[in-house]
Amino acid sequence: MFNSKDILETIKMIQEENLDIRTITMGISLLDCIDSDIDKSCGKVYEKMMRVAQNHVKTGEEIEKRYGIPIINKRLSVTPISMLAAAAKGDPVKFALTLQRVAEGTGVNYIGGYSALVQKGFAAGDRELINSIPEALARTSNVCSSVNVGSTRAGINMDAVALMGRVIKQAAEMTKDNSCFGAAKIVVFCNAVEDNPFMAGAFHGVGEADCVLNVGVSGPGVVRSALSKMPDADIGEIAEQIKKTAFKITRMGQLVGTQASKILGIPFGIVDLSLAPTPAVGDSVAHILEEIGLESCGAHGTTAALALLNDAVKKGGVMASSNVGGLSGAFIPVSEDAGMIDAVNRGSLSIEKLEAMTAVCSVGLDMIAVPGDTSADTISAIIADEAAIGMVNSKTTAVRVIPAIGMKEGETVEFGGLFGSAPIMSLSKFSSSKFISRGGRIPAPLQSLKN
């Protein structure tokens, strides 16, 4: 039986507190599209994706109208393209251009999966795919790329880390007339998950079904609003309120995923209950941390407050759905979070503090603009630090940094839309080049031996 109070509360969350479904992402396996002829393989990719995803956007819009729930993005993710490139002789960029045609034909916002998994070494097709990423992203507007360079089981592939620093720098340079946006569409992972619905890091894992539907929810504004009504609560009460709020948010994601699955005739995969912020006022993870009691995000105590938030979100979400997966927690992207941007501008939040925060949040250093003259080796060292945090702590970590070509610390690069704007952050002036140039592999930690 419907509870009128719950219905009214949900309406208020949507209208006043920026509650939305951030994405419904359809994952599509392309393993049956592998062919030694790259043109034939691209043809198979296009045919299958257009056939399977032709009603994806329409279904999302239908659910929006039926339930009054905003669904911000409709996306696709695919099998890591390096696996197709391994069999096909030719330029991997052809696959990126094919994915772009699919995006235009289906009307989806983004397609993720121009990706490679190289945590323990390079297989056939991996280097070719990775080296092609800058050109692929410069020539497409809706294709996203990710590379997994480490894991708790495998250690960290430092040759791949070094290569990704150069790739990110090149991607920024090739798109310098478009706010260096190519680099904003690249994520470098440690412990990447196979069912992530969020861009730019989504890909369809080889352990997944042929086609599956994953949902990513949001709701930082809802959590902050709930906490604002508890000015004198203790930490335990704060945690309890976040759990209850996360439960309500996740139930909405479960509803949308279930309904979309029925309409499309595709299995429902997971709800990723990550708190994904936007530049909109009142939709900030940083503001939640400040509501808990910090004068500014980045102050001492920020990591502890974020750990509290992340844990409570997960506990509330798993009570609401038996299909929780993906990343699930709290995102801390700088450019996409109005509170994070303010904290950087007022000097309370540094990249070193952000790195500490990544030890307890969902992902890592996300949407961070750095000076345009930052060396590729420095970018690689940032990746190595984040990968080490993920490897040792058995969690997913990632890096998405944007070298703002021609700009320096203190300036701001504008991306627009959900990507917002990013103040260019300062980095250490000391070199890591010798460390990065050594190559090889950082061995897996002792905690990898769990059998």
Image (cartoon, rainbow, N blue to C red):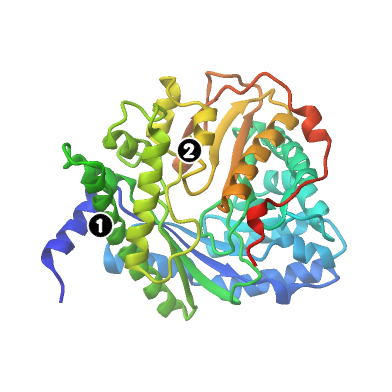
Locate the C terminus and report the quarter of the image it occupies.
Answer: bottom right
- Residue at position x 48%, y 32% in the image: 421
- Whether residue 413 appears in this view of the structure is no
Q: Is residue 228 above or below residue 140?
A: above
Question: Which of the two residues, 358 or 171, is positioned nearer the viewer here?
Answer: 358
Element type at mark 2? helix
Extreme-right residue of the structure: 89
Tell me the kind of residue under disc 1: Lys
Q: How many residues crowd around disc 1 within 10 Å: few (fewer than 14), some, or many (20 or more)?
A: some
Dot 1 or dot 2: first in sequence order is: 1
- Residue at position x 81%, y 73% in the image: 35
Residue 83: image x %, image y %? Answer: 76, 65
- Residue at position x 60%, y 42% in the image: 399
Query: Taking 371 as reference, is 293 left or right?
Result: left
Q: Is residue 346 above or below residue 227?
A: above
* Residue of label 2: 357
- Residue at position x 76%, y 60% in the image: 82
Residue 178: image x %, image y %? Answer: 61, 35
Q: CA distance from mark 1 to mark 2?
A: 24 Å
Locate the N terminus and report the quarter of the image it occupies.
Answer: bottom left
* Residue of label 1: 244
Residue 355: image x %, image y %? Answer: 54, 35
